[in-house]
Image: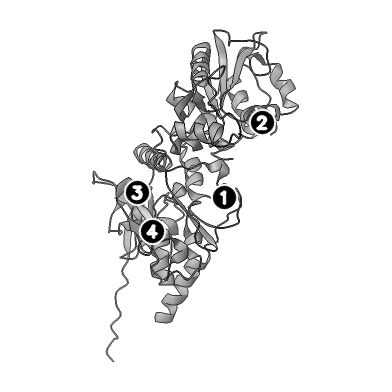
Amino acid sequence: MARQKVPPTQALTLTIDDQTVTAKPGQTVMDVASEHGIDIPHLCYLDGLSIWGACRLCVVEVEGQRRLFSACSTEVAEGMVVSTDSPRLRHYRKVIVEMLFAERNHICAVCVSNGHCELQAMAQRLGVDHIHIPYLNPQLSVDSSHDRFRLDHHRCIVCTRCVRVCAEVEGASTKGMAGRGIMARIINDLNEPWGDSQTCTSCGKCVHVCPTGALVEKGTAAAEMQKRRQFLPYLTVMRDNNHD
Amino acid sequence: MTDASPTPTDAGPKKVTVATVWLDGCSGCHMSFLDIDERLIDLAQHIELVYSPIVDVKHPPAGTNLGLIEGAISNEEDAHKARMMREACGFLISLGDCAVTGNVPSMRNVFELGTVIDRAFRETADLQPQTPTVGVPPLLPKVMPVHEVVPVDLHLPGCPPPADAIYEVLSELIAGRTPDPLRLSRFGR
């Protein structure tokens, strides 16, 4: 009797922070690190959404390479030696967080997300105790036209989680981007007031994936806005299972 | 906190001299300082308050060991007092979010100064609208954190920083150690 052909199990071996780990081809450094209890700092990455690679907080060093790699968008390779923490990486990460604070108007004490904000927590985690860069103090708008939600550009870090969840999970594609660099803004439809949007289903997913107080539920006072994003990995897994 | 009584490196009668100043803030950081409650009695064994809103002295004496600045730099007097503190104090601390980031006072920075003054003193006045110029220091075009005006040695964020954080920072400094301000506080705490 002929033996049945079994596809060979593919496993890669690599090193992350002196720890030897195995991974499947196609996994990212972020995936594998997190499976092994290594929490690489990140803001634009969110499990359940597509990879964006914009915030650069998750940069890691790869042995033999001069440039840095974003862990969320770099696939593992056989024999790779990755370092997720070093004085150089800590310096870059602090500068990134400081630039985010300097670019908009983040006044934690009066923010609805005070105490529940990923930017604020990241500053504390990375040791950002003040901002070396002069604040830009841009005059931005607040869109309160929606019945239930508010978009406050002063508190936005342009991570695009809202854009991705709206397109990929809700399928509405209401949220989008306009402008480039420090002029980049989240927009609704063709840059219309959120309340006038014909495509928004008012599902609130954008609000709950937003890491800061940029997208919030109306009627919340300082420190009252707690995001609930447990739905996201759940929805993603259930949909994947239904397709298989 | 247990067993956190300060142990001065110099156990003699010489106390660490401390100056505090209240610039553009709400005095909440000074309140939080007082909120360290009965530990103040411990602390008083080791520090001498030489200049403060609660001490009737006009200038911090030269050679003061520790200086704490509450509040942002919003007008010319704030900037003057920050420089005065920097000159007098060996080690300068930005105490609280206004001193560290500009915080609430800096929310006017998105507007032109003239617009802010008109809004506060002219548009809202029923009779004889006028801009105060006598006996008040001129406002600066932008509110700044302290470190944009003078070098700062340690930043203790928080709105206000919790009493425990202030107590720990002072105790550690008096003991000759380097405190970690973010262990007990953060922006907006």
Q: Name the residue under label 1.
A: A112
Q: In this view, does B171 lie to the left or right of A122?
A: right
Does label 1 or label 4 sit earlier along the sequence?
1
Question: Between disc 3 and disc 4, whose residue precedes?
Answer: 3
Q: Do the residues labelled 1 and 4 touch (CB within 8 Å)?
A: no
State whether discs 1 and 2 lie on one chain: no
Question: Which residue is identified by label 2?
Answer: B32
Quadrant of residue B48 in the image? Answer: top right
Residue A244 shows in the view = no
Mark 2–mark 3 distance (CA, rounded to whole Å): 37 Å
Circles 1 and 2 in contact, beta carbons < 8 Å = no
| Whole-percent x, y for residue B96 in the image | 57, 31
Q: Say left or right for B105 vs A163.
A: right
Q: As shown in the figure, which amino acid type bears the numbered disc 1?
A: Val
| A172 shown above or below A214 | below
- Cα separation, mark 1 vs mark 2, equals 22 Å
Name the spot of residue A75 as percent of width and height, x first. Answer: 30, 59
Residue at 60 percent of width and 48 percent of height: A222
Amino acid type at image mark 3: Arg
Q: Earlier in the sequence, mark 1 or mark 3?
A: 3
Residue sitting nearer the eye, A90 or A20:
A90
Q: How far apart are marks 1 and 3 (CA)?
A: 26 Å
